[in-house]
Every structure is written in structure tokens, then in C-alpha cells.
Image (spheres, helix red, strand yellow):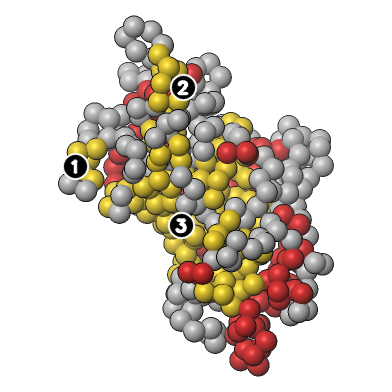
Amino acid sequence: MTWVTGADGSPYGVTNLPYGVFRQNGGPSRIGVRIGSWVFDLAAAEAAELVLAAGTLCRPVLNDFMALGRPQWTAVRQRLTELLTDPAHRDAVEPLLVPLDDVELLLPIEVADYVDFYSSEHHASNVGQIFRPGQPPLLPNWKHLPIGYHGRAGTVVVSGTPVTRPTGQRASAEGPVTGPSVRLDIEAEVGFVVGVPSALGDRVSVDDFAEHVFGVVLVNDWSARDIQAWEYQPLGPFLGKSFATSVSAWVTPLDALADAFVPAPDQDPPVVDYLRDVPHLGLDLRLAVEWNGDQVSEPPFATMYWTPAQQLAHLTVNGASLRTGDLYASGTVSGPDRGQVGSFLELTWGGAEPVKVGGESRTFLDDGDTVTITATAPGPDGTTIGLGEVSGTVRPAR
């Protein structure tokens, strides 16, 4: 129970406490933690010595705090829980609670590197059937390693940032043409934020996932399917993905998701040693995708074939180093049913089977469309953990 007004029973109650960065009235960026419909100003709390984190909570982004490591993350979380549940602290803390409606939410981390994986067997199979009809939907390597690619850290934007329709090359009957994408799509994903770095040349074990990963964000990795289809062979995604990746403003700490870990799907054939995670666990996150306010899909993250720990181990098996602020995303989250897919490519089967949105027949995104992705997870004692939404509106090409 918390003494904070309206927070009990909220998906952002005291069992959650996600971190973010905010500002008021155009002021400086400040680190805060969400409790119900309030933001607890942690910069002010550390300045008042209510919370101690080596001065890192007074910085404009979360990176320095995330670099402190799990013992400090746990200690601060325990202290925040104490401050927000013990009425003895109410007089000191209450003046540092800011109404959520009064703040502007900012990108919570300085993104170091961005990697996007391709970890849903259902999504990969659907895309294989759409892009390579008549061929096996999964390529021979897919069940042996988590497929991924490096994206652009500089185009990761916070939820609410408008997304400009990308321009690029696409195929036509007369040959390649250049212009705005006409098959603009989404990818509903889950992202993992690295706190503790690793040295160049070192490998991070699947067992060390929780020692390096600070928390979780929701991701929309916007995709221009026509640009992607023309460019992706033989080297893979490039301009069709790199124009914008939206992330939620709130980073849910791993500790808040302790009750959401569940057995992941069986892997056949057996994976190689460095990918063998025991126990083999995924996260029971339940996503929902809204298109102009209409819910069109409910992707289940628990169905993902490759786990977050396996993705991290694979990312570093060649000795690539981790940096504080690295973001790696799961790839599109899709379940076995059409109403559980995380892209409109799958929802409309490559545009061949339009869906109704707002009473209109739709395939891909028009200018002015807004997509919002939300998610929940089971928390302790029957509570629900809310992950911060990620939303974006499409603007015309420039």
C-alpha cells in the first residue's frame, strides 16, 4: 500500500516504479519515477538527501545511474518503496510529487547503440510466407541463432514524437523509383536497456543478463515495407528501418517484472552452449496495438522463440562490448493468430486483406494516422504492472 493519492490499484503503483526523464515549463531535464498519476522528482529527492545514488539522480538522463549496477539499483528501489509507503515520510516527499499532466516526458536515456532482433517464430514465418511465397518460411539458420541487425541510435525518439514519412527507392514495373514510402508500417516490440557495460573482447553469459540489463521499454520500430523489400537482399534492413524508432518514456526496472518471467517456448533443435539458458525464461507481457484509437491486435510476448538473455549473449559472443545506454529490441512480437500480430504487414497479409479502421478499409499507414502500443505484465500479489505506452503520429514526407 502507498500513501500517494490514487496510486493504489494503479498499474503504476508501488510495485512498478518506472524511471523516466521530465521537465516542467521548459525547465531543465530531471529524473523522476512514476507513481500513479504523479512523478516523484528524484533530482530534488537526491538534492534533499532523501535518496542517495552518488549524485546520479541529479543528471539529465538515466545513464549514470544505470551504470552503477544492480546493487545500487536495488538499494534505490528499496528506498523509494520505503518513502512511498511509510506515512512518516509523507511530509518530506509530497512536495516533490509533480502531477503527470504538468510535465513533458523526454527520452529517458542517451542511446549508445541500437540493435534490433527478429525473435518471434510466428512473425518470421509470416514474413517469410509473404516475402518468399512457395519457399520455406524460415531460413536454415533461424532456429540456431537470434537473427538481428544494427540500427541507428540517433533516430531513436521518445513516445509522442511525430514520425515523418520516409523517402527512398522502391521497385516498380518500370524499375526503381524514388519517392515517399507507400507501405509504411509498424513493428510492436519490447526493448531492453543496458546499464552495466562490458569490456571489448569479453562475452556476456546468459546467466549475467540481469547484471547488465537495467529495464524494459516498449518499442515501435517503424518500417517502410516497400523500401525494405527492394533493399534488404543481400545485406538486410537499412533505410526501410533507420528513419525512426519510437520508445516509451518510462523504463520499467527488471525488479518490477520479477513475477512476469515464465517458461519460454521449447527450442528444437537444441541450441549451442552459449545460448543455453537454464531456466529458459521469457516474459509474460501482453501488448495491445491501437490504430487511430481502434485496437487491432494483442501480441503476446511470452510466445517469443528467443529470450532476452539469449539475445544479449549472442550480441556479445564475438566480443562486441556493451555500453551504458545500449538498447536492443526483441523484433516484432506476434502470436499464432491474426489478431495477435505486431505489424500491419501481417495484419493485412501484405496488403491483400484490408482491415476496418474507423469504418474505413485500410492496409498501411496514411499521413495523420496515430499508432499507440501499450502493455501489461503480472505483478506480485495479483497486481498489474503497466509499461509506459509508445505512441506516434505519421507526418507527410518532406
What x and y, as percent, mark residue 173? 31, 9
* Residues at circles 2 and 3 in contact by the CB criterion of under 8 Å: no
Point out the residue furthest to the left here.
359
Residue with the mark numbered 1: 360
Residue with the mark numbered 3: 389
In which quadrant will I find the C terminus?
Answer: top left
How would you rate the neighbour count of disc 1 (Cα within 10 Å): few for under 14, some for 14-19, many for 20 or more? few
Nearer the observer: mark 2 or 3; the answer is 2
Q: Amino acid at mark 3?
A: Glu
Residue 75, placed above or below residue 190? below
Query: Which is nearer the eye, 148 or 100?
Result: 100
Residue 362, placed above or below residue 93? above
Q: Quadrant of residue 364?
A: top left
Asked if one can make out residue 379 in the rendered structure from this viewpoint, the answer is: no
What x and y, as percent, mark residue 294? 27, 52
Residue with the mark numbered 2: 168
Mark 1 to mark 2 CA distance (whole Å): 27 Å
Mark 2 to mark 3 CA distance (whole Å): 29 Å
Q: Secondary structure at mark 3?
A: strand
Residue at 75%, 52% (x, y): give it. Answer: 196
Query: Which is nearer the eye, 46 or 73?
Result: 46
Residue at 21%, 48% (x, y): give it. Answer: 358
Among numbered discs 3 and 1, the one appearing first in the sequence:
1
Q: Which mark is residue 263?
A: none
Q: Amino acid at mark 1?
A: Glu
Q: Secondary structure at mark 1?
A: strand
Asked if one can make out residue 244 in the rendered structure from this viewpoint, the answer is: yes
* Residues at circles 3 and 1 in contact by the CB criterion of under 8 Å: no
